Each structure stands twice: as C-alpha cells, then as structure tokens.
Image (spheres, grey):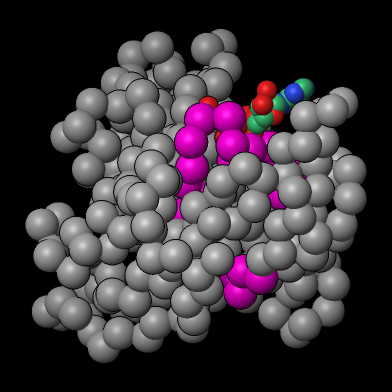
Amino acid sequence: MTVVTHERFHPAETAEHGEHRPAAAATGAAAITLSGLEKSFGANRVLRGINLHIPAGQFVAVIGKSGCGKSTLLRILMGLDEPTGGDLRFEGADGSETGANARIVFQEPRLLPWLSVADNVAVGLGEGIEKRRAREEAKAVLAEVQLAEKAGEWPSRLSGGQRQRVALARALVSRPGILALDEPLGALDALTRISMQQLLNRVWRELGCTTVLVTHDVSEAVHLADRVIVLEEGRIALDLAIPFPHPRRHGNPDLAVLEGRLLSAILGGDGGH
Ligand SMILES: Nc1ncnc2c1ncn2[C@@H]1O[C@H](COP(=O)(O)OP(=O)(O)OP(=O)(O)O)[C@@H](O)[C@H]1O
Ligand SMILES: [Mg+2]
C-alpha cells in the first residue's frame, strides 16, 4: 500500500479579484475516522479493514472497480447501514465526538414531482421548521447552485443537470457536516458534467463541508479532490494526495500524471506500489 501525506493544501489566491479563495473547513464540518472498518453481507466480505482519517473540510474521492464496496462505504458513513466490525467516529471542529450530520446525493436526483423546486429543496430541512423560513433558506441555497430563477418551477420542467443541482441544493440546505456524493454526475452528458464539476468545486470551496465523492471517472476525481482513495478487494490500495490549487484546469499535465497512476492502480498495473 502506498500512503502519501495528505495535508490540506493552502494555495495562494489563484484568480483575479480574489474570487477563487482556497477551501477552508466550515465550522460545522466534521472529521471522519474509520478504524478497522469491516462490512460483510453473509459470506461476502465487502470491506476488509478500512483505516482512514479524513480531516474536516477535506474533499476525498473514492474510486475502484464496480462492486468493490464504494456505495457500501458511503452508506455506512451516512448511518444507513451498520458496519460488521471496526469503528467509525465523527469529530467536530473542537475535537469532540459528534453525530455525522451527513447528506447524500445519488446518481438520480430523486425529486418529488408534486413539489416545486423550492419545496423539494426545503425537504432537506426536515419537519419542524416554519414553511416560510424553509422556503427562504431553500431559495438561498438554490442561488448557490445558480438556480434561483427556477424556485417556483416543477421538477419535470428541468434538464437533467438542473435536477441534479436541485438534489445538491436539497443536500446542502441543512448545512451538513459531511456531504456524500455517489456518482452524482454519472448520468449527465460530458459538457454538463464538466460545468457541474466546476459548480461542485465552487460550492465546496464556499461551504467547506467534508466531502466524499464516489466516482468512476478518474479525471473527475483528480480535478475535484484533495485526495483520491482507490478501493480494491475491500481495502485501500492507494491513498494519493492531489496537491494542486483549486479550481483546476482540464488539460493540466501534472494532473494527467496522477490520473495515469490512479488508472494503473485500478486496472492492476504497478499503480505506484
Ligand atoms: N444490501 C446488500 N445485501 C447484500 N449484498 C450487498 C448489499 N449491498 C451491497 N452488496 C454487495 O456488496 C458488494 C459491494 O457493493 P457496492 O454497491 O458497495 O459496490 P460499488 O463499489 O458501489 O459498485 P458500483 O461501482 O457498481 O456502484 C457487492 O458484491 C454487492 O453485491
Ligand atoms: Mg455504487
């Protein structure tokens, strides 16, 4: 196993007007620590001892072959499934143990067709919040995903990329400590995908939540993440830091080198072992 240090990278301002500030962990962002995490389904040992510390505010991408346990890992992080062994802990900014406060976005947006866009986003706030305030918060987060003008629209009248932005807004509206993304851009065409990657990167830099992105797209992983983890046969086969400032340009040769390294790790080449 190759372990590369993964200190948070603090680049200098990279754009004019200070528009692209580096990410800083949000106060609510949670650190995640997995120790010897195991998950079996009957005789199928899917996760076989995962040890991983994700500092608050870090953006981690998880890649690996189909069926290697990526979604299983996310489900456990979300509290949707129980590990069969090992331990997971979440820590707040002051180092004390907290609940996960995690939200997830899936490949399909899963919007409720009988609710407006704003009301779909407000679903992310749960019950017990006054309706008018919920709508206001929904509208604010819709502006963050550049969909303010669609607040009163029906989901059926949106494009695939717009629907996925609504799903992202619904996940973000409660200001989660952890944002989990399971192939969120997998169903989008190539151009929409690139603009959504830019949007995800900007939103992450602005909100600073700890983010775990599962993707099949190695290029997407190196463009968005501080760190890429390759899962193989239930273990971490490679843990690679991507120490470049955000936002990153497509066509950067340094990223292409890391992309090649990750691809050979997944496909069984030397992968830096
Ligand atoms: N609820 C379940 N019951 C039984 N087996 C399961 C369950 N969920 C997942 N598995 C098994 O766990 C393994 C990992 O599944 P998982 O969905 O985590 O893979 P993945 O890496 O997300 O794959 P993909 O890239 O295709 O989405 C598979 O062998 C799958 O059959
Ligand atoms: Mg999956």
> Would you say 143 lies left or right of 256 here?
right
Q: Determine if the magenta segment contains residue 55.
A: yes
Q: In the image, what residue occupies the spot 84% across and 28% down?
A: 43
Measured from the top left, where is residue 244 in percent x and y?
Answer: 28, 75
Residue at left offset 34%, top offset 76%: 243
User: Quadrant where the N terminus lies?
Assistant: bottom right
- In this rendered view, identify the residue nearer to me: 246 or 27: 246
Q: Residue at x 71, y 64 (%)?
A: 51
Q: 132 or 111, which lies in front?
A: 111
Residue 168, image x, y percentages? 48, 41
- Camera-side residue of 92 and 182: 182
- Residue 19 located left or right of residue 222: left
Q: Quadrant of residue 56?
A: bottom right
Q: How many marks?
A: 0
Residue interval drawn in magenta: 53-77
Q: Is residue 13 above or below residue 58?
A: below
